[in-house]
Amino acid sequence: MSESEMRRQLDGTFRTYSLERGYHTLRVPETWFPGCGKTPRDLQHEAEAARKAAAKRERDVLAERRRERAAMKLAIREAPPAGVSLERALEAVLRAWDVTSAQFLGASRTPRVVGARAHFAWLVRMRRPDLSLADIGRFMGRDHSTVLTASGRFATRPHHERVEAVDRELASE
């Protein structure tokens, strides 16, 4: 049987679909996808739509993160002039979080101590834009990257009561 006869016979018995694969076009018999009720082309379109939707979600998440970072940078730039000493800020944060200075400077990773460190890093970044991350980190006994991570984490999570308590204490002094 020649190739053309086989093609005629196959074309007569199966419906075929062309799938684009890079530089190649595949002819796929309908029987390769039995019972799903969709043609291979439909499946290909669905997969492409799912890929596009996932890419859009990822772009949206990245854009939201960029907006959050921009808002935080703006808040830092618009912070009031340096007027809070690091010692006063540390005392206020330690009282609000009920943490000792030994715990704060130590290696503890309990949520309360970690929260106090993050709050202090965020507060100093907001109130003292003249200080670098390395300066803040040296005061805390930590690395500059720890200060950056902690302040960013604190800014995205609500701690309103403690922030207000520290603000009241710093404003009254």
Image (cartoon, rainbow, N blue to C red):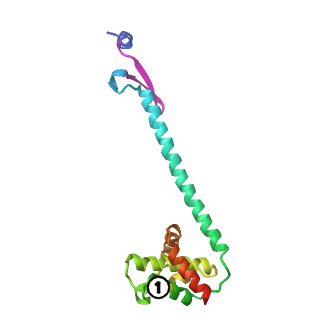
Asked whether, in this view, residue 99 is left or right of residue 166, the answer is left
Q: Residues within 10 Å of mark 1 (few under 14, many from 20)?
A: few
Looking at the rendered structure, the kind of residue marked 1 is Gly
Q: Would you identify the image quadrant in which residue 134 lies? A: bottom right
Residue drawn at point x = 58 percent, y = 63 percent:
68
Residue drawn at point x = 54 percent, y = 82 percent:
166
The x and y percentages for residue 125 are 58, 77
Q: Main secondary structure of the magenta part?
A: strand
Q: Would you identify the image quadrant in which residue 26 lies? A: top left
Q: Quadrant of the C terminus?
A: bottom right
Magenta run includes residue 130: no
Picture layout, residue 98 above or below residue 122:
below
Q: Mark 1 falls on what kind of element?
A: loop
Q: Quadrant of the N terminus?
A: top left
The x and y percentages for residue 24 are 45, 29
Residue assigned mark 1: 141
The x and y percentages for residue 6 are 35, 12
Residue drawn at point x = 58 percent, y = 81 percent:
167
Picture layout, residue 85 above or below residue 145:
below
Visible residue check, residue 133: no
Region rendered in magenta: 13-29
Asked whether, in this view, residue 114 is left or right of residue 131, the answer is left
Picture layout, residue 78 above or below residue 103:
above
The number of discs equals 1
Residue drawn at point x = 65 percent, y = 76 percent:
79
Which of the pair 10/86 is nearer the observer? 86
The x and y percentages for residue 98 are 43, 84
Picture layout, residue 171 above or below residue 52:
below
Q: Would you identify the image quadrant in which residue 129 lies? A: bottom right
Visible residue check, residue 18: yes
Magenta run includes residue 28: yes
